[in-house]
Amino acid sequence: MKTTLVIYGSSTGTCESIASTIASKLGTKAIDVTSVTEDDVRGADNLILGTSTWGAGDMQDDWYDGVKLLKKVGLQGKTVAIFGCGDSESYSDTFCGGMRELYDAALGAGATVVGSVSTDGYTFDDSASAENGEFVGLALDDVNESDKTEERIDAWLAAVKPQLA
């Protein structure tokens, strides 16, 4: 497999834990977006970007500088997959909305984005990250649906791994 780096933004530790799980399953490392460097981004063929969702569907705060870095370096020729954490009960109208900002930033920086996931099996009212029955990446609710997290990660990775090879 080509060089893959998992980059995450986490405020409470949930997204960090999920990033670590994904990285472990891929045999790579996870790095907090506050620690990522231009060389880290340049040195990876593939990026997996993860964010929690805050406020009215916003990405985690540390990602605002992270997105600037991605745009500065450019992602042409790179494959990007995205995952997001959210709360589908308390924030049903903005569930995992932060993924959309990462998705738009990755596309804008020239990346090929892979890893959309069907919204089937999810309970939420609305999400900026969903259109035409699919999320732009892997949506996870480790608060209310922790029993589905591992299975969703495994299914997503099985679909994404061939595109990262």
Image (cartoon, helix red, strand yellow):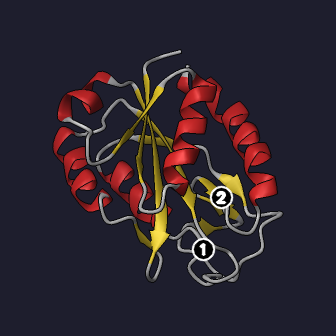
**Which of 92/134 is in front?**
92
Label 2 or label 1, whichever comes before in sequence order: 1
The amino acid on which the numbered mark 2 sits, given as a three-letter code, is Leu
Q: Is residue 21 above or below residue 123?
A: above
Q: Which mark is residue 95?
A: 1
- Viewed as shown, does residue 66 lie left or right of 163? left
Q: Position of residue 109 (x, y in %)?
A: 29, 47
Q: Position of residue 146 (x, y in %)?
A: 75, 58
- Viewed as shown, does residue 24 lie left or right of 3? right
**Which of 69/7 is in front?**
7
Residue at 70% x, 35% y is 159
Q: Residues within 10 Å of mark 2 (few under 14, many from 20)?
A: many
Judged from the image, the secondary structure of the residue bearing numbered disc 2 is strand
Judged from the image, the secondary structure of the residue bearing numbered disc 1 is loop
Q: Is residue 62 above or below residue 128?
A: above
Residue labelled with disc 2: 140
In which quarter of the view is residue 32 placed? Answer: top left
The amino acid on which the numbered mark 1 sits, given as a three-letter code, is Phe
- Viewed as shown, does residue 154 lie left or right of 130? right
Q: CA distance from mark 2 to mark 1?
A: 9 Å
Q: Is residue 26 above or below residue 130?
A: above
Residue at 58% x, 46% y is 18
The residue sitting at the left extreme is 72
Q: Residues within 10 Å of mark 1 (few under 14, many from 20)?
A: many
Q: Is residue 66 above or below residue 155?
A: below
In which quarter of the view is residue 150 placed? Answer: top right
Q: Position of residue 69 (x, y in %)?
A: 20, 47
Q: Position of residue 70 (x, y in %)?
A: 26, 45
